[in-house]
Amino acid sequence: MVDFLKNLGRDESGATAIEYGLIAALIFFAMVGAVQAFGEGAIDMWTDITTAVVTATGA
């Protein structure tokens, strides 16, 4: 059992997978932030357009 734990502590075969997982998570969160920022900008743009149309038509 002690030998198994020592070997497990020296085993680095899963380290690359964990690193790729962390990179993927970072990319995912960056994409979520970008989409959220774009979405808010798009909503603001359409609100401005709606306001301009309502003002122009007097409705």
Image (cartoon, rainbow, N blue to C red):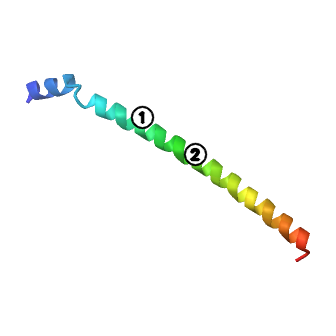
Crowd tier of the residue under label 2, counting other residues whose Cα lies within 10 Å: few below 14, some 14–19, many 20 or above: few
Q: Mark 2 to mark 1: distance in Å?
A: 15 Å
Q: Residue 15: image x %, image y %?
A: 29, 29
Q: Is residue 3 left or right of residue 41?
A: left
Instruction: Check disc 1 and report its element: helix, strand or loop.
Output: helix
**Mark 2: amino acid:** Gly
For the residues bearing labels 2 and 1, Cβ distance under 8 angstroms: no
**Mark 1: amino acid:** Ile
- Nearest the viewer among 16 and 42 is 42
Q: Is residue 50 above or below residue 41?
A: below
Residue matched to label 1: 23
Q: Is residue 7 left or right of residue 42?
A: left
Q: Residue 7: image x %, image y %?
A: 14, 24
Q: Is residue 4 above or below residue 34?
A: above
N-term-proximal mark, 2 vs 1: 1
Q: Which quarter of the rendering shows the N terminus?
A: top left
Q: Is residue 39 above or below residue 51?
A: above
Q: Residue at x 79, y 62 (%)?
A: 49
- Nearest the viewer among 25 and 2 is 25
Q: Residue at x 47, y 39 (%)?
A: 27
Q: Residue at x 17, y 28 (%)?
A: 8
Q: Quadrant of residue 13?
A: top left
Residue matched to label 2: 33
